[in-house]
Image (cartoon, coloured by chain):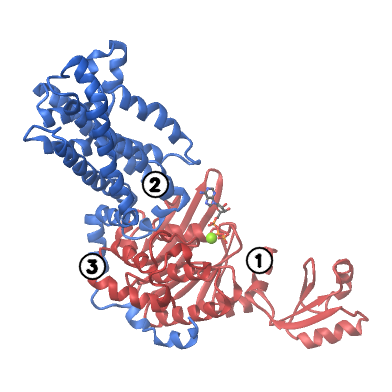
Chain colours: A blue, B red
């Protein structure tokens, strides 16, 4: 820094121009076409590393709080009154639903403001799309990184459930992929929507209050959807939280869900995920090539 | 490759009714250093982004290394080093990590990228900042990092959009020197700038662009020879008198140009012109004889000053 002129002489520009060990440019393009999604996911994960402890603390702390509150507090009250819900104690009933709800709520944070940072506040998306990576791969790469985060978060939640004896079935580990699938079913369309926003993202607070909260409260999380009046049940039907919750309960304690309904729940979650991904790829491509 | 590495024909970009790039044709030969010179809003960045395939064009044909960047984006960009006008570094990541992550987008393995990053840090004179957060760098340091990052894939063509904006004079000269050596090693340079000295230093050949159109094309010397005289006399009579005096300067040189603060007299013999001025009984507050520059070419072609 102090002697730029002398330093200048030391740089071997021939090597800079042609580094022998690098793959050919054609090979670079081919790799980016194949693995570009993963390359961008690496960047997002790298950024998350700085927040590793907060993220982990949140992943462990939240289920612990829920389990204590629901098991010891509300659970005791419910068990006194109703005895069992859906044939199991209240904690076992509510735990898989809480797993699904928390990852879906977390995804509403991951796929809103960070998307705005990518397009607008920090323009993080603009560097990769000037390389061999394409905008659609940036969209899916961001989602992939978030999925990996939720795999970890769901896994930790499941461990806490086990520790509290709230996941009796041998298949209970399936709550992990169910949690992640529920997150993408909401997260992918939300990502596509967030990518269309040009202003400061005031819409997100609205979504938080009027989409995410009702999904949580009216999607059969704390009580079976069937006890709600018919005119409110539609909220559950359109909510990824309810569909995910039903699958998670089946996995966790063998709740009574018919094969047909399993297919319906899965199809709903997969369809929303795929639709969201397709939309996100489209919106990202348009906006980043404008 | 013996043909041009970049070929644009009738290249256009419109935003609604407004044509940001309005049908331009040019070719860039391999190993050449090609410049786009023009004022703010001329369409330079727009053109650069179309070359890199990061902006969809509205019309015309464009070939980079024989491929259409709109269709073969990754294949084209694997050969390019893109230095955008606006730095878009990842401010949360550290300096070295920015280089490594960027290299990953080209599918480059870490075993290649780690030593490469050291090379690039030396190039940018940022060895001491390798583990600093990018957000903590000065503007000029960020600029140098952005330029170094663009070299991570060993590009055949470097697209430099206003490369030295924000650099101090010494860093500018170091950068010019290094770009020159990259060129000697065979890299093609495409540079946009509104600094005349930069265009003259760096470019073998350039196009002067204004309002999305090409006004002239040639080497800096050619352009000066064709569109200006050898010398220019700058005289100042005080801003209120300049307009008044200019009529009396008729015929001193080949032509005059009145700017708000001074009058430019284009002539082949600057000293002779100065003598003629005093023979006419005129006494400018200050006077100066200099050689013609690209600035004069620009003024001549567009009637506007390059730096407005
Ligand atoms: N997204 C956009 N929407 C509308 N107009 C745009 C958009 N991007 C650029 N323009 C317009 O296109 C014209 C050319 O812009 P461009 O950025 O290419 O100029 P430039 O030559 O790079 O200027 P500068 O020297 O200031 O960087 C400008 O008039 C600009 O306002
Ligand atoms: Mg520009």
Residue to which mark 2 is pinned: A114
Q: Tag 3, which chain?
A: B
Q: Secondary structure at mark 2?
A: helix
Quarter of image, res A86: top left
Nearest-to-viewer mark from 2 and 3 = 2
Residue B277, relative to residue A218: is it above or below?
A: below
In the drawing, does residue A195 fall left or right of residue B245? left
Relative to B205, is A98 on the left or the right? left
* Residue at 28%, 53% in the rendered image: A41
Q: Chain of mark 1?
A: B
Q: Position of residue B33 (x, y in %)?
A: 46, 75
The circle on residue B218 is: none
- Does the beta carbon of the residue at mark 2 sit less than 8 Å from ligand 1? no
Between the C-alphas of marks 2 and 3, the distance is 27 Å
x and y percentages locating residue B230 in the rendered image: 68, 82
What residue is pinned by disc 3?
B109
């Amino acid at each position: 820094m102090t002697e730029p002129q002398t330093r200048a002489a030391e740089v071997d520009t021939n090597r800079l121009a042609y580094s022998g060990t690098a793959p050919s440019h054609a090979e670079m393009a081919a790799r980016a076409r194949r693995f570009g999604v993963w390359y961008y996911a690496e960047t997002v994960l790298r950024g998350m590393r700085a927040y590793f402890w907060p993220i982990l603390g949140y992943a462990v702390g939240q289920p612990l709080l829920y389990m204590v509150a629901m098991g010891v507090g509300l659970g005791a009250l419910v068990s006194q009154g109703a005895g069992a819900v859906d044939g199991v104690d209240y904690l076992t009933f509510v735990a898989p639903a809480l797993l699904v709800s928390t990852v879906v709520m977390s995804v509403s944070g991951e796929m809103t403001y960070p998307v705005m940072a990518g397009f607008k506040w920090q323009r993080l998306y603009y560097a990769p799309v000037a390389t061999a990576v394409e905008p659609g791969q940036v969209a899916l790469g961001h989602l992939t990184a978030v999925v990996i985060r939720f795999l970890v978060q769901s896994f930790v939640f499941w461990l806490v459930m086990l520790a509290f004896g709230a996941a009796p079935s041998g298949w209970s580990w399936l709550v992990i992929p169910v949690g992640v699938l529920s997150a993408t079913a909401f997260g992918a369309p939300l990502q596509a929507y967030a990518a269309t926003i040009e202003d400061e993202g005031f819409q997100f607070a609205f979504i938080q209050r009027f989409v995410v909260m009702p999904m949580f409260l009216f999607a059969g999380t704390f009580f079976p959807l069937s006890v709600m009046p018919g005119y409110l049940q539609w909220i559950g039907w359109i909510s990824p939280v309810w569909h995910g919750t039903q699958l998670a309960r089946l996995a966790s304690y063998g709740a009574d869900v018919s094969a047909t309904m399993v297919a319906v729940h899965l199809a709903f979650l997969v369809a929303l995920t795929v639709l969201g991904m397709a939309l996100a790829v489209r919106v990202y491509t348009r906006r980043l090539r404008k | 490759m013996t043909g041009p590495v970049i070929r644009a024909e009738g290249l256009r970009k419109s935003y609604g009714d407004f044509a940001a790039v309005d049908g331009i044709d040019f070719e860039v030969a391999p190993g050449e250093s090609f410049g786009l010179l023009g004022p703010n809003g001329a369409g330079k960045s727009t053109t650069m982004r179309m070359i890199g395939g990061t902006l969809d064009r509205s019309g015309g044909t464009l070939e980079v290394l024989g491929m259409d960047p709109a269709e073969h984006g990754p294949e084209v960009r694997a050969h390019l080093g893109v230095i955008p006008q606006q730095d878009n570094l990842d401010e949360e990541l550290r300096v070295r990590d920015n280089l490594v992550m960027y290299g990953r987008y080209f599918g480059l393995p870490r075993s290649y990228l780690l030593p490469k990053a050291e090379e690039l840090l030396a190039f940018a004179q940022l060895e001491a900042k390798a583990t600093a957060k990018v957000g903590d760098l000065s503007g000029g340091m960020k600029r140098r990092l952005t330029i170094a990052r663009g070299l991570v894939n060993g590009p055949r063509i470097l697209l430099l959009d206003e490369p030295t904006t924000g650099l101090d004079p010494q860093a500018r000269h170091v950068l010019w020197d290094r770009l020159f050596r990259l060129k000697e090693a065979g890299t093609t340079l495409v540079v946009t700038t509104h600094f005349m000295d930069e265009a003259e230093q760096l470019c073998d050949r350039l196009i002067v662009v204004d309002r999305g159109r090409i006004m002239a094309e040639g080497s800096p010397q050619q352009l000066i020879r064709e569109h200006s005289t050898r010398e220019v006399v700058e005289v100042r009579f005080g801003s209120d008198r300049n307009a008044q005096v200019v009529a009396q300067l008729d015929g001193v040189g080949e032509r005059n140009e009145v700017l708000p603060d001074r009058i430019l007299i284009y002539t082949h013999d600057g000293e002779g012109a100065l003598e003629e001025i005093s023979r006419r009984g005129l006494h400018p507050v200050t006077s100066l004889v200099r050689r013609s520059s690209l600035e004069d070419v620009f003024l001549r072609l567009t009637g506007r000053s390059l730096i407005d």
